[in-house]
Image (cartoon, grey):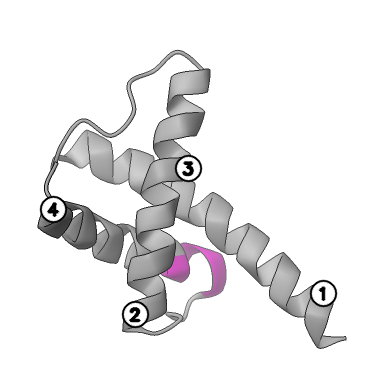
Amino acid sequence: MSVLAWIILGLIAGFVGSKIVNRTGEGVLLDIVLGVIGAVVGGFLFNQFGAAGVTGLNLYSLLVAVVGAVVVLVLYHLVVRGTAR
């Protein structure tokens, strides 16, 4: 997959993941970064459970990336809240 496809997939996954986790986005740049990281994490998690990871720019890969983005965002919010105290 090209870098542009990862960015597009990451943007969409980060945006959707942010809406699921906290109803507001984290900002375009942070949504992209967390979405791309989420796509990698989602691909890793799906591979660990015997399913295919990110296979390209399609709906299945978007689902994998969104699941990973939600996991990354939950961890991100736990860390940010933990350091804000």
- Please tell me which of labels 1 and 3 falls first in the chain: 3
For badge 1, the amino acid type reads Gly
The residue carrying mark 4 is 5
The mark that comes first in sequence, 2 or 3, is 2
Q: Amino acid at mark 2?
A: Leu
x, y percentage for residue 75? 66, 59
Q: In the picture shown, does residue 8 fall above or below 46?
A: below
Q: Residue at x 15, y 37 (%)?
A: 56
At label 2, counting other C-alpha atoms closer than 10 Å, the crowd grade (few under 14, some 14-19, many 20 or more) is: few
Q: Indicate the amino acid at tag 3.
A: Val
Of labels 3 and 4, earlier in sequence is 4
**Residue 32 position within the rendered picture, expressed as x and y whole percent measured from the top left:** 33, 69
User: Which residue is label 2 attached to?
Assistant: 29
Alpha carbon of mark 2 to alpha carbon of mark 3: how far?
Answer: 18 Å
Q: CA distance from mark 4 to mark 1?
A: 33 Å
Residue indicated by mark 1: 82
Which SS class for mark 1? helix
Image quadrant where residue 51 sits: top left
Q: Which residues are magenta?
A: 18-22
C-alpha span from label 4 to label 2:
16 Å
Label 2's element?
helix
**Could you tell me which quadrant the N terminus lies in?**
top left
**Horizontal side, residue 19 vs residue 82: left or right:** left
Kind of residue at badge 4: Ala
On the image, numbered disc 3 is attached to which residue?
41
Q: Mostly what secondary structure, the magenta segment?
A: helix
